[in-house]
Amino acid sequence: MLRRSLMPLFILALTVGSALPAPARAMLYRTPSGTLKDNCVVWHDGKYYLLTMYREEVDGADLQFNDMWLATSADGVHWKDVGPVIHNAPFPIWAIRAWKVGDRFVLNHGSWTTDQKSLLRFWESDDLIHWKYLGEEYDVRRPDGKRLDHMDVVKIEEGGRTQWYGYACGGLLRSEDGVKWTWKEDFQLTDKNWGVGETGGCQRIGERFYLLGGNWQDPRLPGNAKGLPGDAGYSVLTFVANRPEGPFRPDYTALRLNGHSGRRIAEIWACYCRLPGELLLSSYIADPHTPVQWWHAPLKKAVVDSEGHLRMGYWRGNDAMKGAPVPLQPRNCTQIFPMSESNEKATEAAFAVEGDAVRLARRPGKNATWMGYDKPRTAVAVLDERFDVDKGFILEGRMKVERFRGGLPSVGLFIEERPQRGTAVLFHAHRLTEIGTLRLDDDARFDCEDRAGFGCATVAGIEAGKDASFRLLFRKGMFELYLNDLFVQSYCADKPTGRIGFVVRDGKAAFDNLKAWATSL
């Protein structure tokens, strides 16, 4: 039995969902006021519980995160506000993790003391709603005073004995009972050039342990914190071990689980959500309209491929986002580049609709050889349907690209933002995915803003000559994209018009099996 609370009743357990204003929902959930951050999802008794640090002032400082917000969901998609179930604590409440011990839950979060020393604080609950602080004797600090923050927990049965391992931002912890914890050591890494950074969590999958670490690409940060070479922003990296205590090796092939290479923040953070028989990943994305507002993103499926690499996949539970079907008529597609009046400059472009299949072709330049060639040549066609970008929509289909001799083909989607301009996602046949702005004037100019290639667990390119399915989830300028049910990226478009198009460069492409729905959010 866990020790019951020692804390005075400054803690408010509020179940006030019915009294709160209706939240503004986009991609996918945020608090109706203030801001969430570093979200954690716990599944219990057929329901999803979203526990997240919270502050009432959107533009406040980290020290003002002294609440814990709760939302619940029956399906992991449609969330109901409960409110701040820990409110106005006399210390910061930073990233949160919770786990089951017997018939109760234990929670920890990063915090500071009054003299600004880093530590972990612990709470308990019967129902994930009413929380009691366990007291200072349960707090944990590193002996050297360095940062110790948000610990994920793995419970292992070995030799008839329960072993508790804690994976914190700041190292490995151990416990005899899952409640009282002791810091043990820094993470053991096989490559000292890397650091785990902000620990997203650890999970045993098969016979391996997958440890997640969030990192900025910034040499000024301690502990060898870094992302992939060339990345400008925040990334979550994957480290793998055969034992719960390590040593952990960077999974170089699929090191960046999610993140971004450019300076525009997209989806960041990743932590585990454990369901019976299924493992999910939780994350959050930036609101493009405010500097510090965050959204709890759609849950992802944790996928380990045949080579043992962890990737983010489409979770079938997100089908609950599909509302009313949106009729599509591919035969009404319009080619917007090259324009008909410029065909004398680009006679090799071809566009056709056959049944529900949209076909585009664009031959590479005359100088195409294996040693390189001049700038890629592009063709773009758009659906005439205008989707409701505020309500949101889901577009699914299939794409395939084939080579012309000497060319390196690319295929992708185009999100129109104004005439002859929009955001494009390009899947290249040379194992690279790029996202950026595509301008269609006298010529097509693509400015890359984000890319995924070697070292990324997200989709890096497309295999020429093979069908690939895609899923586009879009709402209020935000979108998520999947290829073959693997996560590509979360991103945002600038004032989208609601028209979606198809792109091919230096190849022949086909788009078919197109289906669309309005969101049910």
Image (cartoon, helix red, strand yellow):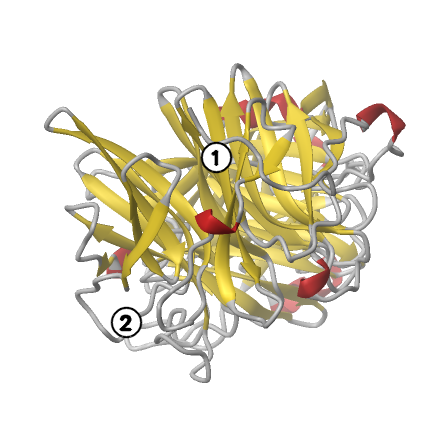
On screen, 50 above or below 78? below
On screen, 395 above or below 45? below
Q: Any mark on residue 236, and which? A: none
Q: Quadrant of residue 193?
A: bottom left
Q: Secondary structure at mark 1?
A: strand
Q: Looking at this view, is 482 or 242 the one in front?
A: 242
Using a 10 Å C-alpha cutoff, classify the residue at mark 1 as few (fewer than 14 neighbours), some (14 to 19) or many (20 or more): many
Q: Position of residue 76 (x, y in %)?
A: 59, 26
Q: What residue did someone put label 1 on?
A: 106
Q: Mark 2 vs mark 1: which is more N-terminal?
A: 1
**x 74%, y 41%: residue:** 26
Please state, as top left, top right, bottom left or bottom right, where the N terminus lies in the image.
top left
Query: Residue flagged by tag 2: what amino acid is it?
Result: Trp
**x 51%, y 53%: residue:** 269
Q: What residue did someone put label 2 on?
A: 370
User: Is residue 188 at least partly visible in the picture?
Assistant: yes
On screen, 357 above or below 86? above
Residue 472 is left or right of residue 367, and the answer is right
Q: Looking at this view, is 320 or 237 the one in front?
A: 237
Query: Residue flagged by tag 1: what amino acid is it?
Result: Val
**x 78%, y 44%: residue:** 498
Please state, as top left, top right, bottom left or bottom right, where the C terminus lies in the image.
top right
Residue 13 is left or right of residue 273, and the answer is right
Total marks shown come to 2
Residue 61 is left or right of residue 199, and the answer is right
User: Is residue 472 at least partly visible in the picture?
Assistant: no
Q: Position of residue 339 (x, y in %)?
A: 72, 59
